[in-house]
């Protein structure tokens, strides 16, 4: 960084340190029940902060669609609304986080979903001299989850619509690529209830887990997507600022 006129060397060093801090890692996790709007918020946050995005649900659905070994191991659990075994999904995410693109930060959505997954992530990051910056909890009550998920439709590329709250311009077709919109098998009513009970039993303990580590930030997911986004973005921007100081 060049010296500005009228500054001495000390100031130049301080400014250089600040410039380094600005690019410090932003390692974020999104947590919340199914249908909380994590995917919608993730789309916006990755744009705001230029982070690579790893959504285990999307990774697994793609693996199923491509008929890979991972897809084969995951399919029956997903169709039933249960969780894929910890060792299977932990391996996938730890590999993803080793990629160069994730070196300066990442946004995880749908992982960790159990305490053993959170332990594995914490340990892997610690071994790499890294840490989680914050865990963003988007909270929505069960009845709202059911209302949202039963009307959810997705495009081939994963763009999400809702038959009442966010319909496409042409019924049943994606606005962006024109592909046919479908209802995910796991968005059918009985599966939604199963996924909610899995969330309460296996994932909700992470709220306390991360709260006790002073990493948890809560957001009211019943607000509009724009309100939630404004709140989350402001919180993440503040984290960055705190990191710089
Ligand atoms: P999602 O799109 O995040 O709701 O994930 C869809 C499904 O993928 C879940 O219902 C699980 O079967 C599976 N899945 C996604 N992430 C995980 C995870 N971290 N651990 C275990 N199973 C997962």
Image (cartoon, rainbow, N blue to C red):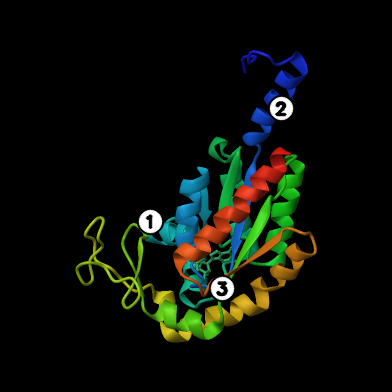
Residue 140 relative to residue 163: left or right: right
In this view, the residue in front, 32 or 185, is 32
Any atom of ligand 1 within 8 Å of the CB at mark 1? no
Going from the N terminus, do you reach mark 2 or mark 1 first? 2
Residue 82 relative to residue 15: left or right: left
Give the class, few, some or many, for how many residues have Cα within 10 Å of label 2's Cα (few <14, many ≥20): few
Going from the N terminus, do you reach mark 3 or mark 1 first? 3
Residue 10 in view here = yes
Any atom of ligand 1 within 8 Å of the CB at mark 3? no
Q: Position of residue 140 (x, y in %)?
A: 55, 76
C-alpha distance separating marks 2 and 1: 46 Å
Q: Which residue is mark 3?
A: 33
Q: Residue at x 62, y 14 (%)?
A: 2
Q: Which-is-in-front pick, marks 2 and 1? A: 2
Q: Position of residue 17 (x, y in %)?
A: 71, 27
Where residue 213 sits, quadrant-wise, is bottom right
Q: Which residue is mark 1?
A: 66
C-alpha distance separating marks 3 and 1: 27 Å
Q: Considering the numbered disc 3 on the image, is that residue within a helix, a strand or a loop?
A: loop
Q: Position of residue 78 (x, y in %)?
A: 49, 71
Residue 175 relative to residue 66: left or right: left
Q: Which residue is mark 2?
A: 17
Q: Residue at x 59, y 60 (%)?
A: 30
Residue 92 in view here = no
């Amino acid at each position: 960084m060049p010296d500005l006129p009228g500054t001495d060397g000390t100031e130049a060093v301080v400014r250089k340190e600040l410039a380094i801090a600005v690019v410090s890692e932003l390692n974020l996790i999104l947590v919340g029940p199914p249908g909380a709007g994590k995917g919608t918020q993730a789309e916006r946050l990755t744009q705001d902060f230029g982070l690579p995005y790893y959504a285990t649900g999307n990774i697994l659905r793609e693996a199923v669609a491509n008929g890979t070994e991972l897809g084969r191991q995951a399919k029956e659990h997903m169709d039933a609304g249960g969780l894929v075994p910890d060792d299977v999904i932990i391996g996938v995410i730890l590999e993803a986080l080793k990629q160069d693109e994730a070196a300066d930060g990442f946004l995880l959505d749908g992982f960790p979903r159990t305490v053993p997954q959170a332990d594995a992530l914490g340990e892997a990051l610690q071994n790499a001299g890294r840490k989680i910056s914050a865990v963003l909890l988007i909270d929505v009550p069960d009845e709202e989850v059911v209302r949202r998920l039963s009307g959810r439709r997705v495009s081939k590329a994963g763009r999400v619509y809702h038959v009442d709250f966010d319909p496409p311009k042409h019924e049943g077709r994606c606005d962006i690529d024109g592909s046919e919109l479908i209802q995910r098998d796991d968005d059918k009513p009985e599966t939604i209830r199963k996924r909610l009970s899995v969330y309460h039993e296996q994932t909700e303990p992470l709220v306390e887990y991360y709260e006790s580590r002073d990493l948890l930030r809560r957001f009211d997911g019943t607000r509009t997507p724009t309100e939630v986004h404004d709140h989350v973005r402001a919180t993440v921007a503040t984290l960055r600022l705190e990191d710089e100081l």
